[in-house]
């Protein structure tokens, strides 16, 4: 696995090289089986392409893009424009049904399956901050990930940030073996499962290594400002109100935030759940949506609905 970069002169040059709606770029990706990302230079206004994959395939894609860029700079922008119509249609987005949130790498169509899930996806895609609150199996995290990938593919945002409170580990996290990813992997596995299902494990690892997808424990979010990012906080019922405030104020320009959790499964022992308190605090704030799910929205095994309903009935009968 290697990486090669091509520096671009600016937005105009990038459009000519990549094609309308990145058609040329996606064609070269598919024909050479590589990943190609567009990045702004750390300083200045320039851009660069990053090509990542197997050595031989990267070299082939690099040569082709370099030759096309030479043609563009020589005043021959249409030298590589002979593209069969089928190449454009190769893109999953071109074949997506109108009601689809995303079409996965395996061709699976992801769409909401209940009225509340439709409302949830609409709140995510049209607003800046959405809270999905409800029991397990209602698609809160899965649909948030699908919306995040949709926004990344359409370049509405430039990266995805996943975070979750690591309640069980506490200060012992630093003593666990391995790097940060290995330390938090067991706690963030449910988020990884969604990405594996939609991207496949290989593409997920490529995007994570290139920092298109960042995975970080909630405690490591302090002091950061995240711009042009899609930020997902999962298992938010296990945040204190102080942690919730810290997380929500990390939001920078051009970013979206989705917070998910189940207020019936709070593991905190020393503080009240921030997810329980936040709706009252943010009530009436424009741009913030709260969607509450129940057992009718469960999309897992049919038995899960009955289990949730049984627990609700048992909780109501318990003496206060």
Image (cartoon, rainbow, N blue to C red):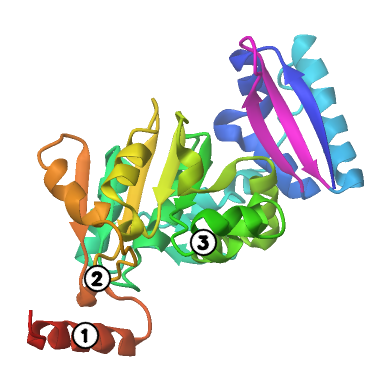
Q: Are marks 2 and 1 in contact (CB under 8 Å)?
A: yes
Q: In the image, what residue occupies the spot 61% across and 11% down?
A: 45
Give the residue number, with chain letter if any, for mark 2.
Answer: 264
Please give the label number shown on residue 169: 3
Regarding mark 2 in the picture, which secondary structure is present there? loop
Question: Percent from the top left, x then y, of residue 121?
Answer: 30, 53
Give the residue number, with chain letter if any, for mark 1.
Answer: 311
Give above or below for 139 relative to 208: below
The CA distance from mark 2 to mark 1 is: 10 Å
Numbered disc in front, either 3 or 1? 3
> Is 45 on the left-hand or right-hand side of 95?
right
Q: In the image, what residue occupies the spot 43% across and 55% down?
A: 165
Quadrant in which residue 313 is drawn: bottom left
Please give the label number shown on residue 76: none
Question: Percent from the top left, x then y, of residue 36?
Answer: 70, 38
Numbered disc in front, either 2 or 3? 3
Label 1 Cα crowd, 10 Å radius (few <14 / some 14-19 / many 20+): few
Q: Is residue 126 magenta?
A: no
State the residue in front, 118 or 241: 241
Residue 99 appears in the figure? no
- Residues shaded magenta: 34-53
**Residue ranking furthest to the right:** 56
Question: Percent from the top left, x then y, of residue 259?
Answer: 33, 51
State the residue in front, 252 or 27: 252
Identify the mark nearer the N-term, 3 or 1. Answer: 3
Q: In the image, what residue occupies the spot 68% across and 40% down?
A: 210
Regarding mark 1 in the picture, which secondary structure is present there? helix
> Is 191 on the left-hand or right-hand side of 9?
left
Q: Is residue 45 magenta?
A: yes
> Is 95 on the left-hand or right-hand side of 10?
left
């Amino acid at each position: 696995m290697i990486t090669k970069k091509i520096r671009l002169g600016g937005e105009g040059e990038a459009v000519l090289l990549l094609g309308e709606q990145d058609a040329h770029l996606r064609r070269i990706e598919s024909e050479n089986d590589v990943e190609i990302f567009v990045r702004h230079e750390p300083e200045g206004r320039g851009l660069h392409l990053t090509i990542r994959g197997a050595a031989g395939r990267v070299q082939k894609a690099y040569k082709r893009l370099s030759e096309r860029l030479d043609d563009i700079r020589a005043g021959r922008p249409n030298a590589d424009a002979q593209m069969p119509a089928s190449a454009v249609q190769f893109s999953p987005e071109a074949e997506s049904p109108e009601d689809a949130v995303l079409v996965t790498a395996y061709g699976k169509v992801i769409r909401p399956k209940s009225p509340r899930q439709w409302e949830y996806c609409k709140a995510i895609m049209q607003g800046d901050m959405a809270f999905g609150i409800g029991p397990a199996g209602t698609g809160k995290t899965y649909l948030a990930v699908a919306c995040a990938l949709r926004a990344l593919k359409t370049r509405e945002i430039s990266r995805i940030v996943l975070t979750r409170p690591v309640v069980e580990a506490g200060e012992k996290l630093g003593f666990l073996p391995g790097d940060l990813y290995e330390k938090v992997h067991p706690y963030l596995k449910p988020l990884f499962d969604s990405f594996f299902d939609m991207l496949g494990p290989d593409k997920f690892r490529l995007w994570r290594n290139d920092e298109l997808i960042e995975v970080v424990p909630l405690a490591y979010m302090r002091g950061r400002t995240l711009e042009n990012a899609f930020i997902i906080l999962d298992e938010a019922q296990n945040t204190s109100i102080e942690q919730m405030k810290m997380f929500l104020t990390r939001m920078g320009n051009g970013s979206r935030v989705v917070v998910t959790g189940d207020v019936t499964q709070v593991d905190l022992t020393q503080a009240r759940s921030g997810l329980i308190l936040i709706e009252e605090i943010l009530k009436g704030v424009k741009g913030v949506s709260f969607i509450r799910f129940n057992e009718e929205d469960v999309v897992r095994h049919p038995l899960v609905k009955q289990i949730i309903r049984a627990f609700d009935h048992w909780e109501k009968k318990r003496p206060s």
